[in-house]
Amino acid sequence: MKLLFVRLGSLGDIIHTVPAVSAVRGALPQASIHWLVDVRHLEVLELVDGVDRIHAIRPTASGWVSAVAGLRREQYEAALDFQGLIKSATLARLSGAKRVVGFTRGALREAAAATFYSESVAPVPGRHVIDKNLSLLRAIDVPQPAAAVFPFVRKPSSALQWARAQVGERVAILNPGAAWPNKRWHPERFGAVAAAIRARHALPSIVIWGPGERELAGRVAAASDGAAQVAPATTIADLFALCGSASLVVSGDTGPLHIAAAARAPIVGLYGPTDPRRNGPWSEDDVCVSRFEACGCHHLRRCVRERWCLEEVSVDEVVSAIDRRLSVAAPSGAPSGRGNQ
């Protein structure tokens, strides 16, 4: 069976879809799995073991034409749209697959996407997004596995070598950035947390950053009383290596947190406009400091309040969450993905 997975982005959403690769490999070892992804997220897919071919699409008219022509030559048995957008559903349909499978209308981010499906699957409501993605595999008779498996390949990392040379093997990773402004916690509070981690747990901190966030990382380090250093620029492979070897990762709901979860790092997550029960780390040992229930901007990029909900999270609250997380020796890897709140 030749299958096409359609998940164009983003980084965290791709990571949440990767366990479907392992599930198909376990149930249908002879299946050929192809993945259609936005070229801007190609790097993360290149680290996934089990994908036979990656189709990277450029977000332009000519990119679409070229990608669709290549997809149609593959003659897929089924295209599975994990994304639930009109553009992803359109591409799944244009692939020429015999079957085009997506979620039922009520479970889609854009309900009109259902128009392009030949079959729909209703996910169990109120579950983690990983569970939702795995439920789509029922259409091809792949049972939901007991645990989510993330088949990422670890590669040598110059950033990890740098970190070990600077601070040794025991380190906390702090990630203050996020694409959504209302997912960001104050950098000065991150700095105070770094100082507390050093004082209470003898852990130095490394501050990671993405495009346009170097100054933000510098503010964290400047407020840490020497407890934190700014990491060099990192690749996705570097982030997997750093998080996978870390004693702790503290982050908002953004790509590096989901990388850390896939790498089985101990995590404290900071959640405002998004629900950690749906988008949080999936080890039961991990701890989420959440304001989702009290937040008025559920899953909105722009806060509807003058005072963002994450501004109400104190340094002491995060330090207490870190103490609880570090009292557990190692992540359990439980698949339910809710995190303790």
Image: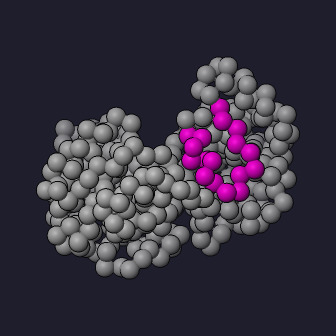
Q: Is residue 220 above or below residue 68?
A: below
Residue placed most toward the observer, 187 or 236 = 236
**Is residue 42 highlighted in magenta?**
yes
Percent of width and height locating residue 325: 32, 73
Residue placed most toward the observer, 94 or 217 = 217
Instruction: Please provide the residue range marked out in magenta.
Output: 41-57
Which quadrant of the view contains residue 266?
bottom left
Q: Is residue 55 above or below residue 171?
A: above
Percent of width and height locating residue 254: 41, 49
Q: Residue at x 19, y 73 (%)?
A: 200
Q: Is residue 111 visible?
A: no
Q: Is residue 194 visible?
A: yes
- Horizontal side, residue 17 vs residue 92: left or right: left
Which quadrant of the view contains residue 171?
bottom left
Q: Is residue 33 above or below residue 128?
A: above
Residue placed most toward the observer, 203 or 303 = 203
Q: Quadrant of the C terminus?
A: bottom left
Q: Residue at x 79, y 27 (%)?
A: 69
Percent of width and height locating residue 302: 32, 36
Percent of width and height locating residue 99: 80, 44
Q: Residue at x 56, y 47 (%)?
A: 44
Q: Is residue 137 above or below residue 78?
A: below
**Is residue 199 highlighted in magenta?**
no
